[in-house]
Image: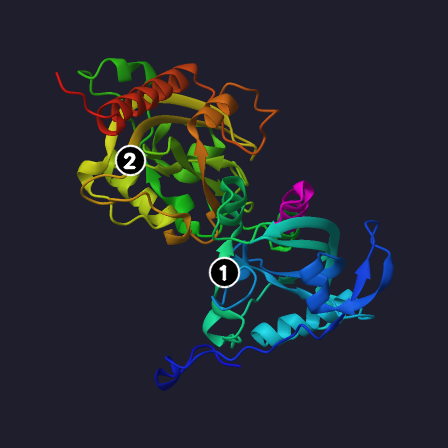
Amino acid sequence: MTEAPDSDEENKPVVKENKDHQILDTLDAEGNCIGTRTRGEVTDKGFWHRYVHVWVLNLPDSAVLMQLRAPEKKRFGGMWNCTSGFVMSGMPSLEACKKHLYSESGLKFEDHMYEFAFSCKESSVFKGEELKQWIDVYVVSLKYPPELHKIFYDIKEAQRLEYIGLGELEQAYADKDENFVLVSAPNYSRRLFQYLHKKIRTYLELIPKVDSDEERQSKKGEQLLDQIGDLDALARPAELNVVSDPCKRNDAYNQSIWHRAVHVWVFDIEGGNILIQQRSDKKRHFGGRWNCSTGHIKMGEHALTTAMKSVKDDVGLKAFKENDFEYLFQANVAMDTGGGCVLRQVVDVYMLTVPNEDSYTEVPTLKSMTLAKGEVESVKYIDIEKLEEIWYGSQSAHPDFVIPTNDEYKQRFWYYIKRRYKKYHDQVLSPSTSP
């Protein structure tokens, strides 16, 4: 096994082992063993058989280890998948998991590390071949996952390995991304993500409660913010008493002091989607909830400077230039953070539109983003109509989202988004007509 072929070997064909002679148990539609046949017969004639999936979960990064299958593979070549494989006749599914994980990636774990998650009945057709599988799904949860360059994988099985964020994988299922091997059984993805997210929540709960907003780095709690002494004076810009003495960031939270902040929304204007990020479960305020990039404006700092730093630090989108940040409006927002305080902020709201001519000529992919450790757990694009529906629903119905409580914020935001979307599609995507 090797991670990559030597340069002298690059042009040599990959010699693949013929496994059609292997003996598999054949099953009835209820999963009962009714006999044995060769693997070739089972796949050619569409018999029910046993199969395993092994998801290696990178707990600190909320990601799973996936392999880009070798293009020469007969099934799903060149597609992303977890470790998977057939269960030989009479073999326990756990032993099959261990065998396939070791043979494909060289990873070995004790039996207790393999957690059985659920079983799934899957019937699908791939390139005219009917696949009927009873899949046992296992999860290996790792607090200290191996670095990719230290995993030596079998080039007959995979082109490369990657840790794929759960948000990206969920997005692939939502979009029916043809680059991924996606189980069509309706309950598979729901049960899988429910299980994986539960494992991550348990992991985070066992970590000493360190608040990345205030306590993990004490310097953040000591940052000085401009507090708003007279909120009504914001409507009278000629007056100079808007900002009073600065306050510490901790005090702004604990004493619910009005202070300044930014929201930055990344808008995929072609697809009608908005990029949202899931705050780390460790965050005391709005932990585990979906929102845009946000940031506190430090004392004397310009809102645009904070906005640029926010989107760069949160999701690693570093190519945006100053003139890409479109200022939309300012709004007063008072919200219960779920962390024992009411957050009071005067928010400058910015929008970044992609694609654009200067910084991002294509919509940034989720895989291209670098998530701030301890701050952002996951990212995804959400349809604007779906997000609007969530915003105008109740917070209790959508507890995983940060929903603005300010009606003016919602109205102005959706006015700008819909107007820009309509204008773009009218002018850019609609075919031109001769006068």
Q: Quadrant of residue 269?
A: top left
Residue 352 circle label: 2
Number of numbered discs: 2
| Left/right of residue 61 with respect to residue 125 in the rendered view | left
Q: Please tell me how crowded label 1 is: few (under 14), some (14-19), or many (20+) other residues with Cα within 10 Å.
A: some
- Compare marks 1 and 2 and give the one earlier in the sequence: 1
x and y, in percent, of residue 49 in the image: 75, 60
Q: Quadrant of residue 19?
A: bottom right
Residue 34 belongs to magenta span: no
Q: Which residue is drawn at 71% across and 68% down?
A: 39
Q: Which amino acid does label 1 sit on?
A: Tyr
Q: Which residue is drawn at 50% across and 60% down?
A: 163
Q: Please tell me how crowded label 2 is: few (under 14), some (14-19), or many (20+) other residues with Cα within 10 Å.
A: many
Dot 1 lies on which element? Answer: strand
Q: Residue at x 68, y 74 (%)?
A: 99
Residue 188 belongs to magenta span: yes
Residue 163 circle label: 1
x and y, in percent, of residue 142 in the image: 61, 64
x and y, in percent, of residue 333 in the image: 41, 23
Main secondary structure type of the part rendered in magenta: helix
Q: Which residue is drawn at 34% across and 50% down?
A: 316
Q: Which of 35 and 58 is in front in this view?
A: 35
Q: Check whether the beta carbons of the residues at disc 1 and disc 2 lie within 8 A of each other.
A: no
Q: What residue type is labelled 2?
A: Leu
| Left/right of residue 427 with respect to residue 214 in the rendered view | left
Residues drawn in magenta? 183-196
Query: Can residue 139 be seen from the camera position used here?
Result: no
Quadrant assignment for the C terminus? top left
